[in-house]
Image (cartoon, grey):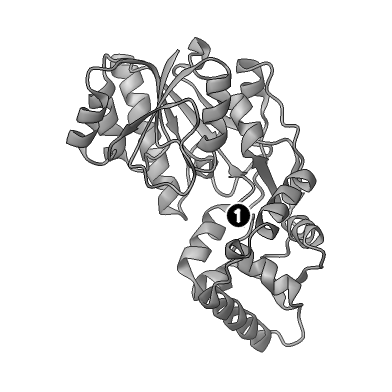
Amino acid sequence: MKVLFLGGTGIISSACAPLAISRGIDLFVLNRGKSVRPEPAGATVLTGDVRDPESVARALGDHTFDVVVNWIAYTPDHIEVDIERFRGRVGQYVFISSASAYQTPAVTLPVTESMILDNPYWLYSRNKIACEDRLVRAYREEKFPMTIVRPSHTYDRTSLPMDGGYTVVDRMLQGKKVIVHGDGTSLWTYTHHADFAKGFVGLLGNTRAIGEAVHITNDEWLTWNQLFQMVASAFGTRANIVHIPSDLIAAHDQRWGDGLLGDKAHCLVFDNSKIKRLVPDFGCTISYSQGVREVRDWYSADAARRVVNPAFNATCDKIIASYQSIWPGRE
């Protein structure tokens, strides 16, 4: 197969690209060449700005593809451009959506692909829903050969599950309090990008996936309290957790709050039966207890990676002080 990745050097795609190449896929990657991650070895690299139609036209020339994957489409106008760009020159168009598009909070668990898409809290998710709506219409009206993939929280060795990243680990190491939203018992799914790739690459060129939407996630369900303590344990310390309501966090930091109220504050776990039917050899084999050791080793290998954000630290201290002024002595 001849496959084009628009993007291709992000957290998720950086695992999908080498697996695709190892399976004999003729992979082309189009990006601006400015990623902090290296281009996948063995791929044909096309340099162009996906937001600049003329730049993309020059890069693609008269190429046609069996599959095109857009890793960096976020709004309906991005989809509209792609429908025009690839109409008649692609066998399958794969849009990377988000599991945060599902009804939030979910009324039934685990979530299946048939759950309605409805997230009133987070603009990012509403835009993804609008993208999906446009693709569904294109499929119905003209049989544009789309497949929708909904990742949930997916990580690599550079990623930590909590807002603030390494700054939170630094607070743990210093014995400072760290914030966990709510009471920390909501369930969450955290998927290693190498596991995600096994399901994803199996969808490429898969005619049974055309016209379908599918999520790809881990079957391991963890609470946020567990996630924080597992991170702390990997770095040889403990997490001194203070539980704070998500809406109070949002009142101090809208960006952080949007991601909580629109996603992480709610239980969100998944039924992965559909991806397993479409890709029978898919299965997640990397537990978070394994994955977090990769994360620890990556940060430990280079002091320059252990970046502490003073602004985030100050926000945490301010939120904790505000909470404890309202409810003195509560943890």
Q: Where's residue 144, x and y in %?
A: 33, 18
Where, by quadrant of the figure, is residue 320 drawn?
bottom right
Quarter containing the C terminus: bottom right
Tell me if 252 is positioned left or right of 84 in this view: right
Q: Residue at x 63, y 26 (%)?
A: 198
* Amino acid type of the residue tagged 1 in the rendering: Lys
| Residue 143 sits above or below residue 273 on the image | above
| Viewer-closest of 6 and 123 | 6
Q: Where's residue 93, x and y in %?
A: 39, 22
Q: Can residue 169 be seen in this view?
A: yes
Quarter containing the N terminus: top left
Tell me if 69 is positioned left or right of 241 in this view: left
The residue that disc 1 covers is 264
Q: Where's residue 234, x and y in %?
A: 79, 57
| Residue 222 sits above or below residue 9 on the image | below
| Residue 1 sits above or below residue 124 on the image | above
| Viewer-closest of 25 and 130 | 25
Tell me if 167 is positioned left or right of 256 in this view: right
Q: Which residue lies furthest to the left in this view?
A: 54
